[in-house]
Image: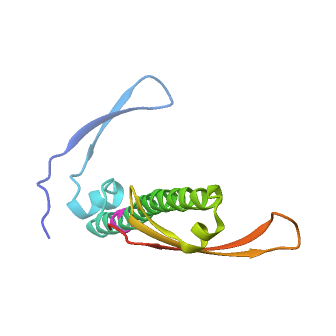
Amino acid sequence: MMTLPACPLRVARSVRSGTRLEAFEVPALTRRATLRRFPSRAFTLIEVLLAVALFAIAVVVLAGAYVNVIEGVESVRSDRAFEQELRWIREKVLLETDLEKVEEGDEVPTPDFGNARWEAVVEPTGVADLFLISLHVEMEGND
């Protein structure tokens, strides 16, 4: 144990009986005694490592969540383009006036998914000029 050299301090204090100051000596403190009286205000290594570990876990979790959001947005964009292509094909089928051409089907190029081959089955209903159309579409994707 290492002790500091004694270097007495002169401290003055007032006495209640008057304005007279009285001097006394304070002995030098050892390092251990100093630490007990004045605790350190710094963080320990364990506290710092724990804080860094918690921060790293939070970063990994938030980064994973961010990647999931980005993938979700991209999936929605892709699904939106696919739905747009299907809507375009459905509109093409519904605008065709010749039932034989509708049942025969067709192959059409699409901007995002290559060629699309569609076939339809037309069934009459109990109402005049109203038909039930089952549409089957096959996409040759460029992806």
Relative height, residue 15 to residue 52 (above, below): above
Q: Is residue 87 left or right of residue 45?
A: right
* Residue 2 vs residue 108, the one in the foreground: 108
* Residue 20 vs residue 33, the one in the foreground: 33
Magenta-colored stretch includes residue 35: no
* Residue 87 vs residue 24, the one in the foreground: 87
Relative height, residue 17 to residue 74 (above, below): above
Residue 5 is situated, as x and y percent measured from the top left of the image, at 11, 54
- Tell me which colouring the rendered structure shows: rainbow
Q: Magenta stretch: give its range.
A: 55-59
Q: Is residue 19 left or right of residue 100?
A: left
Q: Residue at x 40, y 25 (%)?
A: 20
Quarter location, residue 10? top left
Quarter location, residue 133? bottom right
Residue 96 is situated, as x and y percent measured from the top left of the image, at 62, 58
Q: What quarter of the picture does the N terminus occupy?
A: bottom left
Q: What quarter of the picture does the C terminus occupy?
A: bottom left
**Taken as a whole, is the magenta stretch helix, strand or loop?**
helix
Relative height, residue 66 to residue 103 (above, below): above
Quarter location, residue 86? bottom right
State the count of labels: 0
